Image (spheres, grey):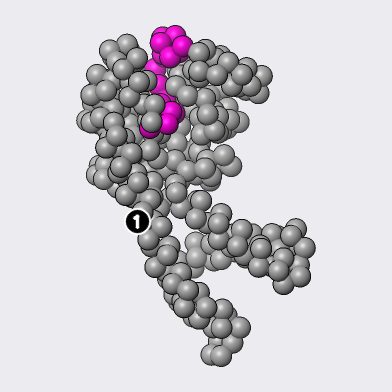
Amino acid sequence: MLKDLKIAFIGGGTMGEMIISRLLSTKTIQQPDLVIVSDPLSTRCLHLEREYGVRTTTSNIEAIQGVSIVILAVKPQVLNSVMAMLKDKISPNALVISIVGGVSIQSLCEGLNHPAVVRTMPNIAVQVGHGTTVWSASPSVTEIQRSHTQVILQALGKEFTTQNEHYLDMATALSSAGTGFIFLYIEAMIDAGVQMGLTRAQAQELTLHTIAGSVELMFQTDEHPAVLRNKVTSPGGVTAAGLYELEKGGMRTVISNAVLTALSRTQQLGNMI
C-alpha cells in the first residue's frame, strides 16, 4: 500500500488507464482522489473521472503539484515536448516512473532535470493483474522509492528489477511486443479451427485452454519446451506432421526476426529523444 501518497499520471491513455484501474481495484491506492491524471483530451479526462473517481486536468503542470510520484505514460513521439514543459518543475523529493518505451534513464533525467527516475516496461496483461514488468532505477532513487515502485508494479503482476538498463530494451521486444505476437498466433489457431468446421466460439475456447494448459505445465514441471514437445510428438503422428509444416515455414526464424526487429525499433525510438 502507498498510504496517502499522491500520484500524478502524465497521460491518460490505454496503459495509463490500465495501471490506474489495477492500483484502485487492488486497494494499492485506497482513495481515488489521491490520483490526478493529465490528458490533453477533455473527453478522456471526463471518462477517467466518471469511471474511476480520479481527479483530472488538461495541464501537466497542474497535475504534478504536491505529488510524491509522477508516472510518465505518454508516447515516445511527444515525450520531448512533455519533458520540456515539466523540466525543473517536479518536486525534488518526487519519484518519476516512466513507462515510455525505449527512452533511457539518462535521457529522462536530463530532459526533466530530475535525478530520481525509474524506467519500466509493462505489458498489456497488467489489465488483468498478470503483467510482466522489468524496471531499473537511477542511483538517486531511494530505498523507500524503490519500495514504492515495487508496490505499484506488483499490483500489475510480476516485476523484475535489473541494474543493467540495457535489458529493458530486450524486455520491450520480448515481453511487451511479444504479447502482440502471441495474439496473432492465437488468432491464426482460431481461424484454422473455423476452417476445419468448428464454430469460432468453439475454436477460441479450445485454443485458449490449450495455450493456458501448456503454459501452466511448463510452470509446474519446469521442463524445457523441447522435452515437453517431444512427449506429445509420436513418430509419424499427427503432431509430427503439423510440426513439420511449422518448421518448413520457418516459424522459428520468423519469430526470432520479429523479436529482433522489435528490439531494433525500441532502440530507434530511444534515439529520437
- Which residue position is annotated with label 1? 260
Q: Residue at x 56, y 78 (%)?
A: 242
Image position, residue 200 (x, y; %): 74, 60
Magenta-colored span: 59-76
Decide which of 108, 194 is in the foreground and name it: 194
Eyeballing the image, is 195 above or below 14?
below
Image position, residue 223 (x, y; %): 44, 70
Occupied quadrant, residue 201: bottom right
Image position, residue 40 (x, y; %): 50, 18
**Which quadrant of the figure contains the C terminus?**
top left
Image position, residue 111 (x, y; %): 27, 23
Outermost residue to the bottom: 236
Count neighbours of disc 1 (C-alpha within 10 A) and say few if under 14, some if 14 to 19, many if 20 or more: some
Occupied quadrant, residue 139: top left
Position of 176 compared to 197: left or right? Answer: left
Q: Residue at x 52, y 12 (%)?
A: 57
Q: Is residue 93 visible?
A: no
Occupied quadrant, residue 271: top left
Decide which of 158, 174 is in the foreground and name it: 174
